[in-house]
Image (cartoon, grey):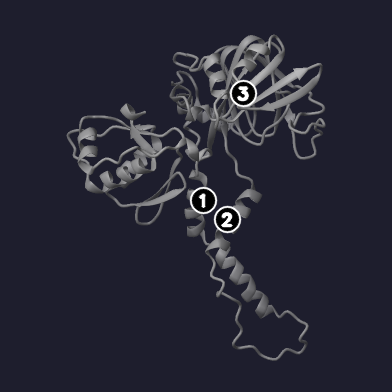
Amino acid sequence: MQFKNFDVDHFLREHWQKQPLLIRNPWVEWTNPLEPDELAGLACEDGVEARMVKLDRARWKLEDGPFPEEKFAKLGAKRWTLLVQAVDQLVPQVAALIEPFRFVPNWRIDDVMVSYATDGGGVGPHFDQYDVFLVQGLGRRRWQVGPLCDAQTELLPHDDLRLLANFQPTAEWVLEPGDILYVPPRFAHDGVALGDDCMTYSIGFRAPSRSELVSNWCDHVLAELDDDDRYADPDLARQANPGEIAPAALDQLHAMVSEALLDRAGFARWFGQYTSTPKYPDAIGEPDEPLTADQFRTRLAAGEPLHRNPASRFAFIRNAASLTLFVDGENLDCTPDTTPFAETLCGNDQVTFNPAEPVNAATIALIAALYDMGSVGFESED
């Protein structure tokens, strides 16, 4: 799916992480990629993260899935919303919704959450810590957007939901199928279904917090340190006062910590692995049988596209020699022979090779490694 009339540069300059924006149906042709019954079916499966939010007599209730199939028949006309996470990893047509938003780096993309709501249903006024594009799939939804929020913003007392106690909207729109509302981080917003069969696709983006980065990077550094690497002072001289921690000692101690934590090359490699670790590892299945190098060559020479697993995450970091490819928490150092393929794979959901140009052995070996990980495959095997 592609946009026909959307100015990416203007959007990034004027709205990204700055101001909300209503985008009236920018698609070449909008087609809702998932039916309500299919979403309900996913919410009944083990291993799928699903929730249901109900509004009953001004009281908000949250239930976690998976749900029994008969539950949906009993809900009736109550105001409720079903939310299913990471549907892009389960339904290729939903994954295709991400493509027009690739102007944001891949490592920032989280997943596509899909919601279904009955008339009057919603999840209540709230704010998120990440950017989100809210794509209206079916039906109509009224969105209201309010001011920026922060840690001091008052919330309603609730064990499970973080709802705003005093929501004061500053703008309001009704979205029709194909319309998109962009909401930057921390902007208050509230969406309410107008009529039944209201489906919304929330394309969310990751934004690691400073505390998250520091905590996880420090854990990694600690795991790599040798316990024998200790402070030493073989040139110790007598001090005037033994109670003083001398400047020279402080400099050495500080250097021990700084050298470990400020290793930029080490941080880059760790972050590539960290950010490419899949959110739902169980969704990545290894192939039943490995393929030989000749089998890969035959299928690629026939023009068979190599597909990325929608549940996998791909990124790369350039270095002096070539680049390092990060896939599903693993790092693979590329050579000049494999770099073009790695770059193409990170920028596209599928790769097709030119039958007139034989694939070099190093690239075949890299493809085989990714195939054995379950990170890439052929469409005929899906």
Residue 253 sits in which quadrant? bottom right
The residue that appears at 70% across and 91% down in the rendered structure is 238
N-term-proximal mark, 1 vs 2: 2
The disc at residue 67 is 3
Residue 15 can be seen in this image: no
Q: Quadrant of the N terminus?
A: top left
Residue depicted at x 59% and y 87%: 234
Question: Foreground residue, 63 or 122?
Answer: 63
* Location of residue 318 in the rendering, given as x and y in whole percent from the top left corner: 41, 50
The residue under label 2 is which amino acid type? Trp
Q: x, y percentage for residue 222?
A: 58, 63
Amino acid under label 3? Phe
* Label 3 secondary element: loop
Work out how far the residue at label 1 is from the one at label 3, CA to CA, in angstroms: 36 Å
Task: State which quarter of the image contains the C terminus.
Answer: top left
Q: Earlier in the sequence, mark 1 or mark 3?
A: 3
Q: Which mark is residue 217?
A: 2
Q: Circle 2: is it few (<14), some (14-19), or many (20+) Cα within 10 Å?
A: some
Q: Nearer the viewer, mark 3 or mark 2?
A: 3
Q: Would you say the residues marked 1 and 2 are in contact, meaning their CB atoms lie under 8 Å apart?
A: yes
| Horizontal relation, residue 89 to residue 345: left or right | right
Q: Nearer the viewer, mark 1 or mark 3?
A: 3
Residue tagged 1: 271
Q: Secondary structure at mark 2?
A: helix
User: In the image, 174: left or right of 326?
Assistant: right
Q: Residue type at mark 1?
A: Phe
40 horizontally vs 151: left or right? left
Marks counted in the figure total 3
* Marks 3/2: CA–CA distance: 37 Å
Q: Position of residue 148 (x, y in %)?
A: 73, 32
